[in-house]
């Protein structure tokens, strides 16, 4: 009985279309938090279409819990199966996936989660794994998400507040308090009033440590918090506020002045000394200083959100609108135009791909369904991986990538118009969203594909020695940037892990990042917004060689289109280096991934080093399929062209050389030297027909072409020295060709004449045989044999 492979079983159980879709779904969008093998328990969180979904496989309960639309909407088991489940099966160990599939009929597929306990536990597991690696910002974000059931959240609230204070994370601390109040958890918060007081007092001692924008964020949180939390504890903080109000540090001055003026009535009731704390002249000079900072940020192209917050808070401080609004409005319009330019640059890149890889415009037959449209894609376009890449960066989703939201069509209107021939002016909702984003000046907007060239990444050759600069490799992560579906905060690139990742706008490399570029980044995020958008700090760009070396040492990474996961899979011996090379080379997306050949070159160097280091393991691999595995090593050595036209026992040579400890270049030289030795031995022995292993036409441009004349002489001599005997049998003429049948030319001619295993041939075939020999100027040594 032939055992079916995992892909064959998946296709047999769920269909080929879903299997192929799962191969395209990015590995990094599935975060497997926890795996237990006996009984099987798998907890994971999945990011898809900017939403988080939970997938929990529980063998003991014979249950697969998932909350994606397929599970939620459909009642039939076979209809519930989604790409997330298939992808998870492909990511876990093969033996676990096979166990689940073998018993799949007994599993119950459900979306029921009473009290949201399953999702909450998933988030807690994920937060704990973050805390274990000192990634507290992300850990706190997941703890916040774990508060789903309000009746059982006290322990989570306390854990969050304690960890935030321990790690001096007061932006997160006060945002969490604000969120709890907005979610009507004030009664539970009041149980931990002592943490709130401690956190506020610690904040006053650390405002100088924060960027100004984070002071603004904290103030926004406090505006909500102290509507519900008693301020009586601030009675003893007068001296501290006095120092801050008259501090030379803008953070301290701004925070203290705003806080006192915002809560003025409450504070003077608690402590009357607050009433005269801010002198009039000092307040006016402080306003001028704050406005000067505001205008300076406009000159420095600050994030618009920062200026919005300041504008909102100016009212409390007493800065009148007429002193700043015209400059603010002008800058806001400028940023809006810059945002449009970012989108147009994105469209230029996609249009360039369309032109370069022959994507045709087709009729989409736009069919409205609620707030989405169902689109028909051209079948030929769908076969092109470039087309798949393009539509997924415009917001298409669903099993066949046929669904797109009205607002996504409106925002991406100008590139959608390039892809589809339909008249979109007949759809009012699309027109509305287009006008909302782009305005009425359609004629002023043009997609110039030439501008897309600026987004093609270059090969990075330099080495930053990041491993040497950071004492803990766990502090750094490698990220491959991708063209953003929705450019956020002016960034044309983002990345996808279990969250959407964007580069910090304050980073010097922000405007220089391109799709497909690899970068070293700090793992701990600068900020997490909306619990799903993570801003991170970029350290430097990263070469393929550096990335492979760093991953080999255990550095985390977020994979994009370069198959970096193969590095880890090879090191963990989950896949052989031969299979890894084959997988990388056969990557369907390689046609449009920049500098993919350079990646393959560096990847093969890594594979060879692994082969050289793991000789015993490789010997066993070669034994399992000597010919195929030997050919794979030749590919890794980049010797395919040099060995063209040779059919030699490479596996024996490799086994001999793999016992020696040499580097890649030495190995190649020794390997070629062994080939020369074998060829000379073959030519010296002159065994009949042994030159069949040489294809002189293919050898023409190889280092072994120098043997061609000698090979031709041997072939000629062996053929002409063999005797063909003419004889008569029962009045019929025959020719005995047994002596030349096994010569090089004999084999070739007999194959052409379809003579087979016969050692005697009739005159008609001998005549054709003679014609072939005369064309090659070969002589037939003809004799007479008495029969």
Image (spheres, rainbow, N blue to C red):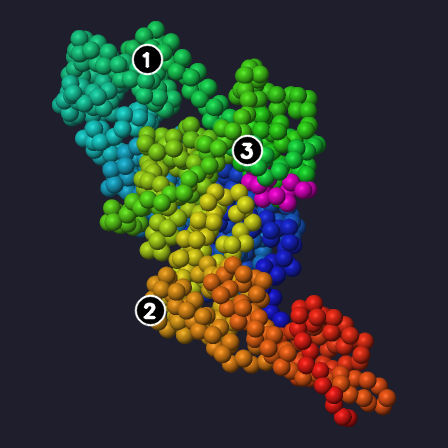
What crowding class fits label 1: few (fewer than 14 Cα within 10 Å), some (14-19), or many (20 or more)?
A: few
Label 2 sits on residue? 661
Residue 199, position as x, y percentages in the image: 24, 34
Q: Secondary structure at mark 1?
A: helix
Q: Secondary structure at mark 2?
A: loop
User: Depth-wise, is mark 3 or mark 1 nearer the camera?
Assistant: 3
Q: Secondary structure at mark 3?
A: helix
Report the Cα–Cα distance between label 3 and label 2.
Answer: 48 Å
Q: Is residue 383 covered in magenta?
A: yes
Q: Is residue 171 visible?
A: yes
Task: Examine the residues drawn in magenta and state their main secondary structure.
Answer: helix
Write down the region rendered in magenta: 379-391
Report the Cα–Cα distance between label 1 and label 2.
Answer: 74 Å
4 in relation to 58, above or below: below
Label 3 sits on residue? 352
What crowding class fits label 3: few (fewer than 14 Cα within 10 Å), some (14-19), or many (20 or more)?
A: some
Quadrant including the C terminus: bottom right
Label 1 sits on residue? 315
Foreground of the two, 674 or 568? 674
- Do labels 3 and 1 touch, CB within 8 Å? no
- Do labels 1 and 2 touch, CB within 8 Å? no
Foreground of the two, 462 or 502? 462
Residue 689, position as x, y percentages in the image: 60, 77
Between disc 3 and disc 2, whose residue precedes?
3
233 in relation to 657, above or below: above
> Can you tell which mark lies on residue 782?
none
Residue 164, position as x, y percentages in the image: 28, 39
| Residue at 40% in and 13% down | 329
Residue that sits furthest to the right in the current view: 731
Quadrant including the N terminus: bottom right
Foreground of the two, 338 or 666? 666
């Amino acid at each position: 009985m032939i055992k079916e492979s995992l892909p064959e079983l998946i296709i047999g159980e769920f269909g080929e279309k879903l299997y192929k879709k799962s191969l395209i779904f990015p590995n990094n969008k599935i975060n497997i938090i926890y795996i237990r093998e006996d009984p099987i328990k798998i907890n994971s969180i999945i990011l898809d279409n900017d939403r988080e979904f939970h997938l929990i496989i529980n063998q003991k309960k014979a249950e697969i819990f998932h909350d994606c639309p397929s599970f939620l909407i459909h009642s039939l088991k076979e209809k519930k199966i989604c790409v997330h489940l298939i992808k998870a099966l492909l990511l876990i160990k093969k033996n676990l996936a096979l166990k689940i599939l073998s018993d799949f009929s007994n599993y119950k597929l459900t979306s029921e989660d009473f009290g949201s306990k399953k999702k909450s536990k998933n988030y807690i597991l994920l937060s704990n794994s973050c805390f274990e690696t000192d990634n507290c910002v992300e850990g706190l974000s997941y703890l916040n998400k774990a508060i789903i059931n309000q009746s059982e959240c006290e322990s989570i609230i306390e854990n969050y507040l304690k960890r935030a204070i321990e790690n001096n994370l007061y932006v997160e601390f006060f945002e969490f308090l604000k969120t709890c109040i907005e979610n009507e958890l004030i009664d539970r918060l009041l149980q931990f009033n002592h943490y709130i007081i401690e956190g506020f007092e610690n904040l006053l001692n650390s405002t100088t440590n924060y960027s100004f924008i984070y002071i603004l964020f904290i103030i926004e949180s406090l505006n909500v918090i102290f509507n519900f939390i008693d301020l009586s504890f601030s009675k003893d903080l007068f001296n501290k506020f006095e120092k801050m109000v008259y501090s030379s540090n803008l953070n301290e001055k701004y925070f203290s002045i705003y806080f006192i003026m915002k809560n003025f009535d409450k504070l003077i009731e608690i402590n009357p000394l607050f009433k005269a704390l801010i002198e009039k002249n000092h307040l006016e000079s402080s306003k001028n200083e704050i406005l000067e900072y505001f205008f300076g940020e406009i000159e420095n192209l600050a994030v618009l959100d920062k200026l919005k917050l300041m504008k909102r808070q100016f009212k409390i401080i007493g800065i009148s609108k007429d002193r700043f609004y015209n400059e603010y409005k002008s800058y806001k319009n400028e940023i809006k135009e810059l945002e449009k330019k970012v989108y147009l640059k994105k469209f230029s890149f996609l249009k360039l791909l369309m032109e370069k890889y022959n994507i045709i415009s087709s009729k989409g037959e736009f069919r409205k369904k609620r707030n989405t449209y169902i689109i028909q894609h051209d079948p030929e376009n769908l076969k092109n991986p470039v087309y798949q890449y393009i539509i997924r960066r415009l917001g298409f989703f669903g099993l066949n990538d046929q669904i797109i939201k009205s607002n996504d069509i409106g925002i991406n209107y100008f590139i959608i118009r390039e892809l589809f021939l339909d008249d979109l002016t007949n759809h009012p909702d699309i027109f509305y969203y287009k006008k909302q984003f782009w305005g009425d000046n359609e004629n002023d907007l043009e997609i110039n594909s030439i501008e897309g060239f600026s987004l093609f990444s270059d090969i990075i050759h330099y080495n930053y020695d990041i491993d040497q600069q950071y004492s803990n490799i766990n502090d750094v992560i490698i990220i491959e940037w991708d063209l953003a579906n929705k450019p956020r905060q002016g960034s044309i690139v983002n990345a996808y892990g279990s969250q959407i990742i964007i580069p910090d706008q304050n980073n010097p490399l922000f405007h220089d990042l391109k799709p497909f570029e690899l970068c070293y980044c700090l793992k701990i995020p600068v900020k997490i917004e909306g619990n799903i958008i993570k801003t991170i700090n970029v350290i430097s760009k990263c070469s393929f060689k550096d990335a492979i070396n760093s991953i080999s040492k255990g550095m985390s990474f977020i994979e994009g289109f370069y198959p970096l996961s193969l590095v880890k899979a090879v090191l963990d011996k989950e896949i052989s280096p031969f299979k890894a090379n084959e997988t990388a080379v056969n990557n369907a997306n390689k046609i449009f991934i920049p500098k993919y050949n350079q990646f393959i070159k560096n990847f093969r160097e890594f594979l060879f080093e692994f082969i050289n280091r793991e000789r015993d393991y490789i010997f066993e691999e070669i034994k399992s399929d000597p010919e195929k595995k030997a050919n794979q090593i030749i590919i890794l050595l980049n010797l395919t062209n040099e060995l063209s036209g040779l059919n030699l026992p490479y596996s024996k040579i490799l086994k001999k050389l793999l016992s020696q400890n040499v580097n890649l270049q030495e190995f190649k030289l020794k390997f070629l030297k062994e080939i020369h030795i074998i060829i000379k031995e073959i030519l010296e022995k002159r065994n009949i027909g042994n030159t069949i292993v040489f294809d002189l036409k293919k050898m023409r441009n190889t280092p072994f072409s120098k043997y061609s004349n000698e090979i031709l002489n041997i072939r000629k001599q062996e053929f002409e020295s063999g005797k063909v005997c003419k004889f008569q049998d029962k009045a019929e003429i025959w020719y005995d060709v047994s002596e030349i049948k096994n010569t090089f030319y004999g084999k070739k001619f007999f194959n052409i004449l379809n003579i087979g295993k016969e050692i005697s041939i009739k005159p008609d075939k001998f005549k054709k045989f003679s014609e072939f020999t005369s064309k090659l100027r070969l002589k037939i040594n003809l004799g007479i044999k008495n029969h």
